[in-house]
Image: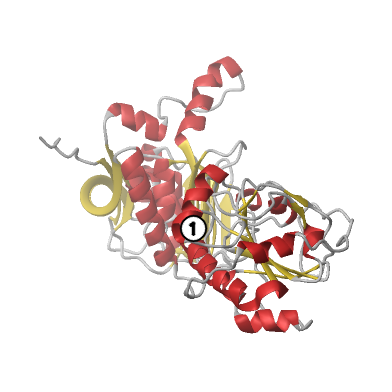
Amino acid sequence: MLIISIPRPAMALLGISLLWLAQLFLDPGKAIAQASPPPAGLTTGDPVPEVHLTNIYQAPYTEAKLSDYQGKLLLLDFWATWCAPCIQSLHKLDSLQQQFGEALVVLPVTDEPLSKVAPFWQKRGWRLPTITSDTVLRRLFPHQAIPHQVWIRDGRVLAITGGEYATAANIRTALSGKSFQFKAKQEVQLEKDKPIFINGNGGAGEQLLYQSVLSTRLPADIGGDARRKDRILAYNLPLPALYLVAYSDVFRFHDQENRLLLEVSDSLRQRLTGENFETLTGDYATDAPFLRWMEENQYCYSLILPQEQPREVLNGIMREDLNRLFGQYLGIHGSLQRRKVDCLVLVRTSRKDLLATKGTPRQRVSDDETFALQNSPFAHLLSRLQYEYMRQPLPIVDETGYTGNIDIRLPRPLSNLEQLRAALQAYGLDLRPARRKLDMLVISELKQQPASR
Protein backbone atom coordinates (compact mmCIF):
# COMPACT_ATOMS: atom_id res chain seq x y z
CA MET A 1 0.00 0.00 0.00
CA LEU A 2 1.20 3.50 -0.84
CA ILE A 3 0.66 6.82 0.89
CA ILE A 4 -1.67 8.98 -1.18
CA SER A 5 -1.26 12.71 -1.58
CA ILE A 6 -4.38 14.75 -2.32
CA PRO A 7 -4.39 16.83 -5.55
CA ARG A 8 -6.55 19.79 -6.47
CA PRO A 9 -9.99 19.11 -7.94
CA ALA A 10 -9.95 17.63 -11.43
CA MET A 11 -10.52 19.79 -14.50
CA ALA A 12 -12.84 18.90 -17.34
CA LEU A 13 -11.94 15.91 -19.52
CA LEU A 14 -10.58 16.79 -23.00
CA GLY A 15 -8.62 14.65 -25.49
CA ILE A 16 -5.81 14.81 -28.00
CA SER A 17 -5.69 13.02 -31.32
CA LEU A 18 -3.65 9.93 -32.06
CA LEU A 19 -2.31 11.73 -35.15
CA TRP A 20 -0.79 14.42 -32.92
CA LEU A 21 0.62 11.71 -30.63
CA ALA A 22 2.29 10.12 -33.65
CA GLN A 23 4.19 13.36 -34.27
CA LEU A 24 5.52 13.29 -30.72
CA PHE A 25 6.88 9.78 -31.06
CA LEU A 26 8.30 10.34 -34.55
CA ASP A 27 10.26 13.47 -33.60
CA PRO A 28 13.41 12.10 -31.90
CA GLY A 29 15.89 14.57 -30.48
CA LYS A 30 19.42 14.37 -29.16
CA ALA A 31 20.28 12.03 -26.30
CA ILE A 32 19.48 13.73 -22.99
CA ALA A 33 22.40 12.48 -20.91
CA GLN A 34 24.33 9.26 -20.52
CA ALA A 35 25.24 9.46 -16.81
CA SER A 36 23.94 6.69 -14.54
CA PRO A 37 21.39 7.76 -11.92
CA PRO A 38 22.51 7.80 -8.28
CA PRO A 39 21.40 4.81 -6.14
CA ALA A 40 18.80 6.94 -4.31
CA GLY A 41 17.31 8.14 -7.59
CA LEU A 42 17.40 11.46 -9.40
CA THR A 43 16.52 14.76 -7.80
CA THR A 44 15.85 18.31 -8.99
CA GLY A 45 18.68 19.62 -11.18
CA ASP A 46 20.11 16.20 -12.05
CA PRO A 47 20.79 15.29 -15.70
CA VAL A 48 18.47 12.55 -16.95
CA PRO A 49 20.15 9.45 -18.42
CA GLU A 50 18.94 7.84 -21.60
CA VAL A 51 16.23 5.31 -20.85
CA HIS A 52 14.49 2.89 -23.19
CA LEU A 53 10.73 2.90 -22.58
CA THR A 54 8.50 -0.09 -23.33
CA ASN A 55 4.86 -1.13 -22.83
CA ILE A 56 3.46 2.21 -24.01
CA TYR A 57 -0.29 1.88 -24.29
CA GLN A 58 -2.53 4.02 -26.55
CA ALA A 59 0.25 5.44 -28.71
CA PRO A 60 1.29 4.69 -32.31
CA TYR A 61 4.32 2.82 -31.02
CA THR A 62 4.86 0.71 -27.94
CA GLU A 63 8.49 1.74 -27.41
CA ALA A 64 10.43 5.03 -27.20
CA LYS A 65 13.41 6.72 -25.56
CA LEU A 66 13.37 9.59 -23.10
CA SER A 67 15.53 11.49 -25.57
CA ASP A 68 12.62 11.38 -28.04
CA TYR A 69 11.07 14.19 -25.99
CA GLN A 70 14.05 16.54 -26.21
CA GLY A 71 12.94 20.15 -26.76
CA LYS A 72 9.59 19.61 -25.08
CA LEU A 73 8.40 19.85 -21.47
CA LEU A 74 8.00 16.24 -20.33
CA LEU A 75 5.74 15.54 -17.36
CA LEU A 76 5.95 12.01 -16.00
CA ASP A 77 2.94 11.16 -13.81
CA PHE A 78 3.20 8.01 -11.66
CA TRP A 79 -0.25 6.63 -10.90
CA ALA A 80 -2.29 3.49 -10.05
CA THR A 81 -5.82 2.32 -10.81
CA TRP A 82 -6.74 2.12 -7.10
CA CYS A 83 -5.60 5.69 -6.37
CA ALA A 84 -8.57 8.10 -6.37
CA PRO A 85 -6.39 11.27 -6.30
CA CYS A 86 -4.46 9.88 -9.28
CA ILE A 87 -7.67 9.56 -11.27
CA GLN A 88 -8.59 13.16 -10.51
CA SER A 89 -5.09 14.23 -11.50
CA LEU A 90 -5.24 12.32 -14.79
CA HIS A 91 -8.50 14.05 -15.73
CA LYS A 92 -6.73 17.37 -15.22
CA LEU A 93 -3.59 16.28 -17.10
CA ASP A 94 -5.64 15.08 -20.07
CA SER A 95 -7.16 18.57 -20.28
CA LEU A 96 -3.78 20.32 -19.90
CA GLN A 97 -2.29 18.20 -22.68
CA GLN A 98 -5.02 19.37 -25.00
CA GLN A 99 -4.50 22.98 -23.92
CA PHE A 100 -0.72 23.11 -24.53
CA GLY A 101 -0.43 20.83 -27.54
CA GLU A 102 2.97 19.74 -28.84
CA ALA A 103 5.02 21.85 -26.42
CA LEU A 104 3.97 19.58 -23.54
CA VAL A 105 4.20 15.80 -23.27
CA VAL A 106 2.26 14.24 -20.42
CA LEU A 107 3.31 10.63 -19.93
CA PRO A 108 1.55 8.70 -17.15
CA VAL A 109 3.47 5.73 -15.71
CA THR A 110 2.19 2.72 -13.74
CA ASP A 111 3.63 -0.61 -12.68
CA GLU A 112 0.27 -2.30 -13.18
CA PRO A 113 -0.18 -4.63 -16.21
CA LEU A 114 -1.88 -3.74 -19.46
CA SER A 115 -4.67 -6.24 -18.77
CA LYS A 116 -5.73 -4.13 -15.80
CA VAL A 117 -4.93 -0.70 -17.23
CA ALA A 118 -6.58 -0.96 -20.70
CA PRO A 119 -10.22 -1.41 -19.60
CA PHE A 120 -9.72 1.16 -16.84
CA TRP A 121 -8.30 3.67 -19.36
CA GLN A 122 -10.95 3.04 -22.00
CA LYS A 123 -13.80 3.43 -19.50
CA ARG A 124 -12.67 7.00 -18.77
CA GLY A 125 -12.06 7.99 -22.37
CA TRP A 126 -8.56 9.40 -21.84
CA ARG A 127 -6.53 10.07 -24.98
CA LEU A 128 -3.22 10.22 -23.15
CA PRO A 129 -0.74 7.38 -23.61
CA THR A 130 0.48 5.55 -20.52
CA ILE A 131 3.37 3.26 -19.71
CA THR A 132 2.30 -0.01 -18.09
CA SER A 133 4.25 -2.67 -16.16
CA ASP A 134 6.98 -0.09 -15.48
CA THR A 135 10.16 -1.25 -13.78
CA VAL A 136 12.60 1.33 -15.18
CA LEU A 137 11.27 4.80 -14.42
CA ARG A 138 10.32 3.95 -10.84
CA ARG A 139 13.94 3.01 -10.13
CA LEU A 140 15.03 6.28 -11.72
CA PHE A 141 12.49 8.27 -9.65
CA PRO A 142 11.73 6.20 -6.51
CA HIS A 143 8.67 7.25 -4.53
CA GLN A 144 5.97 6.00 -2.20
CA ALA A 145 3.23 8.61 -2.40
CA ILE A 146 1.24 9.06 -5.60
CA PRO A 147 0.48 11.05 -7.70
CA HIS A 148 4.21 11.54 -8.14
CA GLN A 149 5.12 13.92 -10.95
CA VAL A 150 8.53 14.52 -12.49
CA TRP A 151 9.08 17.58 -14.69
CA ILE A 152 11.90 17.24 -17.26
CA ARG A 153 13.16 20.07 -19.46
CA ASP A 154 16.36 20.42 -21.50
CA GLY A 155 17.68 17.07 -20.32
CA ARG A 156 17.43 17.81 -16.60
CA VAL A 157 14.97 17.29 -13.81
CA LEU A 158 13.16 20.61 -13.43
CA ALA A 159 10.96 19.63 -10.48
CA ILE A 160 9.58 16.65 -8.55
CA THR A 161 6.16 17.43 -7.13
CA GLY A 162 2.80 16.13 -6.09
CA GLY A 163 -0.16 16.42 -8.44
CA GLU A 164 -1.21 19.85 -7.18
CA TYR A 165 1.54 21.69 -9.12
CA ALA A 166 0.35 20.55 -12.57
CA THR A 167 -1.43 23.83 -13.38
CA ALA A 168 -1.60 25.91 -16.54
CA ALA A 169 0.31 28.76 -14.86
CA ASN A 170 3.21 26.51 -13.80
CA ILE A 171 3.36 24.85 -17.21
CA ARG A 172 3.57 28.25 -18.95
CA THR A 173 6.41 29.28 -16.64
CA ALA A 174 8.29 26.04 -17.30
CA LEU A 175 7.78 26.34 -21.06
CA SER A 176 9.19 29.88 -20.97
CA GLY A 177 12.47 28.51 -19.62
CA LYS A 178 11.93 29.84 -16.12
CA SER A 179 11.59 27.95 -12.86
CA PHE A 180 8.30 28.01 -11.00
CA GLN A 181 8.09 27.99 -7.25
CA PHE A 182 7.15 24.67 -5.72
CA LYS A 183 7.55 22.59 -2.59
CA ALA A 184 9.73 19.64 -3.45
CA LYS A 185 7.84 16.41 -2.95
CA GLN A 186 9.32 14.70 0.08
CA GLU A 187 9.67 10.96 0.27
CA VAL A 188 10.56 8.74 3.19
CA GLN A 189 11.12 4.99 3.21
CA LEU A 190 8.13 3.58 5.01
CA GLU A 191 7.20 -0.09 5.19
CA LYS A 192 3.60 -0.23 6.34
CA ASP A 193 3.87 -3.64 8.01
CA LYS A 194 6.74 -2.56 10.30
CA PRO A 195 6.79 -0.24 13.36
CA ILE A 196 7.38 3.40 12.54
CA PHE A 197 10.83 4.87 13.33
CA ILE A 198 12.31 1.43 14.11
CA ASN A 199 15.53 0.92 12.12
CA GLY A 200 14.83 4.17 10.27
CA ASN A 201 11.39 3.11 9.04
CA GLY A 202 9.79 6.48 8.33
CA GLY A 203 12.91 8.37 9.40
CA ALA A 204 14.82 8.82 12.63
CA GLY A 205 11.76 10.01 14.58
CA GLU A 206 12.40 13.76 14.77
CA GLN A 207 8.66 14.34 14.22
CA LEU A 208 7.63 12.11 17.11
CA LEU A 209 4.95 13.71 19.29
CA TYR A 210 3.59 10.77 21.26
CA GLN A 211 4.61 7.15 21.50
CA SER A 212 3.93 4.26 23.81
CA VAL A 213 5.56 0.89 23.20
CA LEU A 214 5.26 -2.47 24.94
CA SER A 215 7.67 -5.29 24.17
CA THR A 216 8.93 -8.57 25.52
CA ARG A 217 12.22 -8.80 27.39
CA LEU A 218 15.36 -7.24 25.91
CA PRO A 219 18.28 -9.65 25.45
CA ALA A 220 20.29 -7.99 28.22
CA ASP A 221 20.94 -8.83 31.86
CA ILE A 222 19.57 -5.55 33.16
CA GLY A 223 16.25 -4.38 34.48
CA GLY A 224 14.77 -1.29 36.04
CA ASP A 225 13.12 1.98 35.16
CA ALA A 226 14.08 5.56 34.35
CA ARG A 227 12.08 8.67 33.69
CA ARG A 228 12.20 12.28 32.67
CA LYS A 229 9.42 14.82 32.89
CA ASP A 230 8.20 13.90 29.41
CA ARG A 231 8.83 10.14 29.33
CA ILE A 232 8.97 6.80 31.14
CA LEU A 233 11.16 3.82 30.36
CA ALA A 234 10.75 0.51 32.20
CA TYR A 235 12.75 -2.47 30.99
CA ASN A 236 12.95 -6.20 31.70
CA LEU A 237 10.40 -6.17 34.51
CA PRO A 238 7.65 -8.65 35.42
CA LEU A 239 4.15 -7.28 35.08
CA PRO A 240 3.54 -6.43 38.78
CA ALA A 241 6.74 -4.36 38.77
CA LEU A 242 5.52 -2.52 35.67
CA TYR A 243 2.31 -1.63 37.48
CA LEU A 244 4.28 -0.41 40.50
CA VAL A 245 6.25 1.90 38.19
CA ALA A 246 2.89 3.20 36.95
CA TYR A 247 1.82 3.86 40.57
CA SER A 248 5.08 5.47 41.70
CA ASP A 249 3.17 8.65 42.52
CA VAL A 250 1.24 6.64 45.15
CA PHE A 251 3.76 4.15 46.54
CA ARG A 252 7.30 4.90 47.60
CA PHE A 253 10.10 2.53 46.60
CA HIS A 254 10.35 0.79 49.96
CA ASP A 255 6.64 0.14 50.47
CA GLN A 256 5.77 -1.21 47.06
CA GLU A 257 5.99 -4.98 47.18
CA ASN A 258 3.89 -5.45 50.32
CA ARG A 259 1.22 -3.08 48.99
CA LEU A 260 0.42 -5.48 46.14
CA LEU A 261 -2.51 -7.90 46.07
CA LEU A 262 -2.74 -10.54 43.33
CA GLU A 263 -6.27 -11.84 42.98
CA VAL A 264 -5.57 -14.30 40.21
CA SER A 265 -5.40 -18.06 39.67
CA ASP A 266 -2.34 -19.97 40.86
CA SER A 267 -1.12 -20.56 37.30
CA LEU A 268 -1.43 -16.88 36.45
CA ARG A 269 0.24 -15.88 39.73
CA GLN A 270 3.25 -18.03 38.82
CA ARG A 271 3.36 -16.41 35.41
CA LEU A 272 3.22 -12.91 36.88
CA THR A 273 5.71 -13.39 39.71
CA GLY A 274 7.84 -16.47 39.05
CA GLU A 275 7.59 -17.08 42.79
CA ASN A 276 8.63 -20.73 42.46
CA PHE A 277 12.08 -19.52 41.44
CA GLU A 278 14.31 -18.03 44.11
CA THR A 279 17.38 -16.69 42.34
CA LEU A 280 19.92 -17.60 39.69
CA THR A 281 22.45 -20.12 40.95
CA GLY A 282 25.09 -20.06 38.23
CA ASP A 283 24.31 -23.64 37.22
CA TYR A 284 22.76 -23.48 33.75
CA ALA A 285 20.73 -26.67 34.04
CA THR A 286 19.27 -25.52 37.35
CA ASP A 287 18.66 -21.98 36.12
CA ALA A 288 17.14 -22.90 32.74
CA PRO A 289 13.47 -22.84 33.91
CA PHE A 290 13.99 -19.47 35.61
CA LEU A 291 15.70 -18.06 32.52
CA ARG A 292 12.84 -19.30 30.37
CA TRP A 293 10.31 -17.67 32.71
CA MET A 294 12.20 -14.37 32.49
CA GLU A 295 12.22 -14.59 28.69
CA GLU A 296 8.48 -15.22 28.53
CA ASN A 297 7.18 -13.03 31.36
CA GLN A 298 9.29 -9.90 31.58
CA TYR A 299 8.43 -6.82 29.56
CA CYS A 300 9.61 -3.38 28.50
CA TYR A 301 7.46 -0.28 28.33
CA SER A 302 8.28 3.14 26.88
CA LEU A 303 6.19 6.32 26.89
CA ILE A 304 7.17 9.60 25.23
CA LEU A 305 4.99 12.73 25.39
CA PRO A 306 5.37 15.98 23.41
CA GLN A 307 6.06 18.09 26.50
CA GLU A 308 6.77 17.85 30.20
CA GLN A 309 3.93 16.63 32.39
CA PRO A 310 3.45 16.00 36.13
CA ARG A 311 4.41 12.51 37.28
CA GLU A 312 0.79 11.57 37.93
CA VAL A 313 -0.15 12.42 34.34
CA LEU A 314 2.55 10.20 32.86
CA ASN A 315 1.72 7.44 35.31
CA GLY A 316 -1.97 7.70 34.46
CA ILE A 317 -1.25 7.15 30.77
CA MET A 318 1.02 4.21 31.59
CA ARG A 319 -1.71 2.64 33.76
CA GLU A 320 -4.24 2.99 30.95
CA ASP A 321 -1.81 1.40 28.49
CA LEU A 322 -1.05 -1.54 30.78
CA ASN A 323 -4.72 -2.21 31.51
CA ARG A 324 -5.70 -1.98 27.86
CA LEU A 325 -2.88 -4.15 26.54
CA PHE A 326 -2.72 -6.76 29.29
CA GLY A 327 -6.47 -6.83 29.58
CA GLN A 328 -6.45 -8.21 26.05
CA TYR A 329 -3.26 -10.24 26.39
CA LEU A 330 -3.64 -11.85 29.85
CA GLY A 331 -7.15 -10.89 30.91
CA ILE A 332 -6.01 -8.87 33.94
CA HIS A 333 -6.59 -5.38 35.30
CA GLY A 334 -4.68 -3.28 37.81
CA SER A 335 -6.32 -0.69 40.08
CA LEU A 336 -5.78 1.24 43.29
CA GLN A 337 -8.19 0.07 46.01
CA ARG A 338 -8.66 0.83 49.69
CA ARG A 339 -8.42 -2.54 51.47
CA LYS A 340 -8.26 -3.70 55.07
CA VAL A 341 -5.05 -5.71 55.33
CA ASP A 342 -2.68 -7.19 57.92
CA CYS A 343 0.24 -4.91 58.73
CA LEU A 344 2.73 -3.89 61.42
CA VAL A 345 1.83 -0.67 63.20
CA LEU A 346 4.60 1.43 64.74
CA VAL A 347 3.19 2.92 67.95
CA ARG A 348 4.39 4.75 71.06
CA THR A 349 4.16 2.80 74.32
CA SER A 350 5.14 5.56 76.74
CA ARG A 351 4.01 9.13 77.30
CA LYS A 352 7.60 9.97 78.17
CA ASP A 353 9.70 11.02 75.19
CA LEU A 354 12.57 8.52 75.14
CA LEU A 355 13.60 9.41 71.56
CA ALA A 356 14.36 13.14 71.69
CA THR A 357 17.87 13.99 70.53
CA LYS A 358 20.41 15.36 72.96
CA GLY A 359 21.52 17.82 70.29
CA THR A 360 24.79 16.18 69.28
CA PRO A 361 25.95 16.46 65.63
CA ARG A 362 23.80 14.54 63.13
CA GLN A 363 25.16 11.08 62.42
CA ARG A 364 24.03 7.81 60.85
CA VAL A 365 25.65 4.42 61.52
CA SER A 366 24.79 1.27 59.58
CA ASP A 367 27.14 -1.72 59.86
CA ASP A 368 26.84 -5.46 60.41
CA GLU A 369 26.00 -5.06 64.09
CA THR A 370 24.25 -1.72 64.57
CA PHE A 371 21.86 0.73 63.00
CA ALA A 372 21.98 4.10 64.78
CA LEU A 373 20.67 7.61 64.19
CA GLN A 374 21.88 10.69 66.02
CA ASN A 375 20.03 14.00 65.85
CA SER A 376 18.14 12.74 62.75
CA PRO A 377 14.49 13.10 61.74
CA PHE A 378 12.13 10.38 62.99
CA ALA A 379 11.18 9.85 59.33
CA HIS A 380 14.64 8.37 58.72
CA LEU A 381 13.91 5.59 61.21
CA LEU A 382 10.52 4.88 59.64
CA SER A 383 12.01 4.84 56.14
CA ARG A 384 14.72 2.40 57.19
CA LEU A 385 12.26 0.01 58.82
CA GLN A 386 9.99 0.10 55.77
CA TYR A 387 12.99 -0.62 53.54
CA GLU A 388 14.05 -3.60 55.68
CA TYR A 389 10.52 -5.05 55.54
CA MET A 390 9.59 -4.18 51.95
CA ARG A 391 9.83 -7.83 50.85
CA GLN A 392 7.90 -9.04 53.88
CA PRO A 393 4.14 -9.57 53.53
CA LEU A 394 3.24 -7.02 56.23
CA PRO A 395 3.63 -3.31 55.42
CA ILE A 396 4.75 -0.98 58.22
CA VAL A 397 2.35 1.83 59.14
CA ASP A 398 3.36 4.75 61.36
CA GLU A 399 0.85 5.79 64.04
CA THR A 400 3.29 7.47 66.43
CA GLY A 401 2.66 11.03 65.28
CA TYR A 402 6.30 11.77 66.16
CA THR A 403 7.92 14.59 64.13
CA GLY A 404 11.09 15.66 65.96
CA ASN A 405 14.73 14.62 65.64
CA ILE A 406 15.77 11.49 67.52
CA ASP A 407 18.70 9.50 68.90
CA ILE A 408 18.30 5.72 68.58
CA ARG A 409 20.55 2.63 68.45
CA LEU A 410 19.18 -0.74 67.27
CA PRO A 411 20.87 -4.14 66.85
CA ARG A 412 21.14 -5.70 63.39
CA PRO A 413 19.55 -7.43 61.63
CA LEU A 414 16.48 -5.24 61.71
CA SER A 415 14.58 -7.96 59.88
CA ASN A 416 14.56 -10.04 63.11
CA LEU A 417 11.15 -8.84 64.25
CA GLU A 418 11.32 -10.29 67.79
CA GLN A 419 14.73 -8.73 68.43
CA LEU A 420 13.66 -5.43 66.85
CA ARG A 421 10.53 -5.14 69.01
CA ALA A 422 12.56 -5.73 72.16
CA ALA A 423 15.04 -3.01 71.19
CA LEU A 424 12.28 -0.52 70.31
CA GLN A 425 10.71 -0.96 73.75
CA ALA A 426 13.67 0.87 75.32
CA TYR A 427 12.64 3.96 73.31
CA GLY A 428 8.93 3.75 74.06
CA LEU A 429 8.09 2.18 70.68
CA ASP A 430 6.63 -1.09 69.40
CA LEU A 431 5.74 -2.80 66.11
CA ARG A 432 2.39 -4.48 66.66
CA PRO A 433 0.44 -6.72 64.28
CA ALA A 434 -2.89 -5.15 63.34
CA ARG A 435 -5.33 -4.66 60.46
CA ARG A 436 -5.66 -1.29 58.79
CA LYS A 437 -7.24 0.14 55.68
CA LEU A 438 -4.47 0.96 53.20
CA ASP A 439 -4.20 1.93 49.54
CA MET A 440 -3.31 -1.31 47.74
CA LEU A 441 -2.44 -2.10 44.16
CA VAL A 442 -4.84 -4.89 43.21
CA ILE A 443 -4.17 -6.95 40.10
CA SER A 444 -7.17 -9.11 39.34
CA GLU A 445 -8.51 -11.24 36.53
CA LEU A 446 -11.22 -9.78 34.35
CA LYS A 447 -14.53 -11.55 34.43
CA GLN A 448 -15.20 -13.40 31.22
CA GLN A 449 -18.18 -12.13 29.28
CA PRO A 450 -20.84 -14.80 28.75
CA ALA A 451 -20.81 -16.20 25.25
CA SER A 452 -23.55 -14.79 23.03
CA ARG A 453 -26.13 -17.23 21.83
Q: Residue at x 32, y 26 (%)?
A: 267
Farthest left residue in view: 453
- Which residue, given by chain and number where applicable, does mark 1 sit on? 83
Q: Give the quadrant of residue 269.
A: top left
Q: In the rendered picture of this protein, how many numbered marks are placed on residues?
A: 1
Viewport quadrant of the C terminus: top left
Q: Observer-nearest residue: 175 or 257?
A: 175
Examine the rendered structure and indicate whether residue 304 appears above or below residue 98: above
Amino acid on which the number 1 mark rests in the picture: Cys
Assess disc 1: are there few (<14), some (14-19) or many (≥20) residues with their C-alpha within 10 Å of its C-alpha. some
Q: Is residue 168 visible?
A: yes
Give left or right: position of 184 versus 231.
right
* Residue drawn at the location 37% of the way across and 55% of the way down: 319
Q: Position of residue 434 (x, y in %)?
A: 22, 46
Q: Nearer the viewer, residue 77 or 37?
A: 77
Q: Quick check: 318 left or right of 156?
A: left
Q: Is residue 431 above or below residue 162?
A: above
What is the x, y in percent for residue 382?
41, 56
Question: Furthest-front residue in view?
Answer: 19
Q: How is the image coloured?
A: secondary structure
- Asked whether residue 181 is in view, the answer is no
Vertical position of residue 279 compared to residue 378: above or below? above
Residue at coordinates 47% horizontally, 49% vertically from top-left?
A: 119
Residue shown at 74% from the left, 59% from the top: 25
Depicted 189 relative to depicted 194: above or below: below
The spot of residue 290 in percent (x, y) is 50, 25
The answer to which of 130 and 38 lies nearer the viewer is 130
| SS class, disc 1 | loop
- How far across and down, in percent of the image, does residue 162 sit? 60, 69
Q: In this view, which residue lies farthest toward the top? A: 285
